[in-house]
Amino acid sequence: MGEQNNCRVVAIANQKGGVGKTTTTSNLGIGLARQGKRVLLIDADAQGSLTASLGYREPDKLDITLANVMGNIINEEEMDAAYGILRHEEGVDLMPGNIELSGVEVSLVNVMSRETVLRSYIEEQRSRYDYILIDYMPSLGMLTINAVAAADSILIPVQAAYLPVKGLEQLIKTIGKVKRQINPRLEIEGILMTMVDSRTTYARDISKLLIENYGSRVRIFNSSIPMSVRAAEISAEGTSIYKHDPNGKVAKAYQSLTEEVLGNE
């Protein structure tokens, strides 16, 4: 089933804020588009950070977002496949998210097939894209379950400053549970180290720990994303790191992550 049109659906996981999930979603997505892939980014986070980082400054003022799309599916209303999708100048499509997703979270509780509302939307989109990346919120609510139920794989960014072993363990357990109960095709795409400070030896130690603890079960990407002031600046500009600082170390890191993900095809 996951092989339909060979589209790959990757959810970018997060057990807590601040690990760079949104930056990873947009830069990996744009990286894939630069390699000629058709890419849809889905902002399933009520904060709308992905939407804002792509230049839509005020997500809450957008007319159509993922909240409307999911509402239409819940109410069994027909809609065009391209409904609400925004086109970003760097070659990716975006299904935006905003605060209205909080309301969807609440209304999903009473829906019959509540875990798979997002999946039914994504199944409709598979034929139109090579990659669909989902940026979802750091909670274990209904929207998160929807994201992991719709995905083929989950990419896990981990902050290099310390190893959130408990959180990671919990996340891997949750993924296993979803795989058993809701989405048998779900795999872990890999663990990505982010915010690596090259001046410290932390990153090397943590990388070693990650490999020791998880290397036999989960792929750990060779690419890691360095800490960078410029990367922090870009989300304020609505452009990707490739445009902002094309020769910088962060752009190179995302480029090599993109190649690793493509190598996984």
Image (cartoon, rainbow, N blue to C red):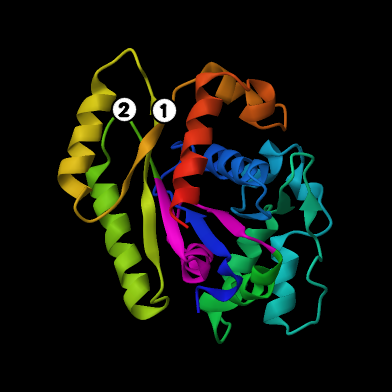
Which callout, 1 or 2, points at the residue further toward the start of the chain? 2
Is residue 27 found left or right of 209 in the rendered image? Answer: right
Q: Examine the rendered structure and indicate whether residue 184 appears above or below residue 133.
A: below
Residue bounds of the magenta highlight: 129-156
| 4, above or below 46, in the image | below
The residue that disc 1 covers is 195
Residue of label 2: 161
Q: Which mark is residue 157?
A: none
* 123 displayed left or right of 172: right
x, y percentage for residue 142?
A: 50, 68
- Can see residue 229? yes
Residue 133 drawn in magenta: yes
Q: What SS does tag 2 mark?
A: loop
At a point 50% along the width and 65% down the height, the residue shown is 151
The answer to whether marks 1 and 2 mark residues whose Cβ atoms lie closer than 8 Å is yes
User: Can you say whether 187 is above or below 58 in the image?
Assistant: below
> Residue 44 location in percent, x, y?
60, 57
Identity of the residue drawn at 41% across and 28% down: 195
